[in-house]
């Protein structure tokens, strides 16, 4: 399950008690292009898709 939490995208796998941030540093903004996802600032994501490799792609 994907969860949007305070300007960050988190993954909560079924049957596990761990939530991992995969995108967004928790601060609203528009920075971090071409950097690791957890270092990016997200502002108002429009949608999230997951590619065939299981990686999220966020439109912000």
Image: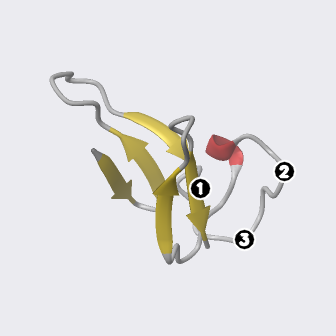
Mark 3 highlights which residue?
A: 30
Q: Which residue is mark 1?
A: 57
Tag 2, which secondary structure? loop
User: Quick one: which residue is furthest to the left in this view?
Assistant: 15
Percent position (x, y) of residue 24? 58, 52
Q: Nearer the viewer, residue 1 or 26?
A: 1
Asked if residue 56 is positioned above or below residue 49 in the image, the reply reads: above
Q: Which residue is mark 2?
A: 34
N-term mark: 3 or 1: 3
Q: CA distance from mark 3 to mark 2?
A: 12 Å
Secondary structure of the residue carrying numbered label 3: loop
Which residue is farthest front? 52
Specify the label residue 27 is tagged with: none
Q: Are marks 3 and 1 in contact (CB under 8 Å)?
A: no
Q: Secondary structure at mark 1?
A: strand
Q: Nearer the viewer, mark 3 or mark 1?
A: 1
What is the crowding at mark 3: few (fewer than 14 residues within 10 Å), some, or many (at least 20)? Answer: few
Q: Is residue 14 above or below residue 43?
A: above
Marks 2 and 1, the one that precedes in the sequence: 2
On the picture, is 6 further left or further right than 45? left
Residue mark closest to the camera, 2 vs 1:
1
How far, Cα to Cα, is label 3 from label 1?
A: 15 Å
- Outermost residue on the right side: it is 34
| Among the 4 quarters of the image, the one containing residue 30 | bottom right
Q: Position of residue 5 (x, y in %)?
A: 36, 56
């Amino acid at each position: 399950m994907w969860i949007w939490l305070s300007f960050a995208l988190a993954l909560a796998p079924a049957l596990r008690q761990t939530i991992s941030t995969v995108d967004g540093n928790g601060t609203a903004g528009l920075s971090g292009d071409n950097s690791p996802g957890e270092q990016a600032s997200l502002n108002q994501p429009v949608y999230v898709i997951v590619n065939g490799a299981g990686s999220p792609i966020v439109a912000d």
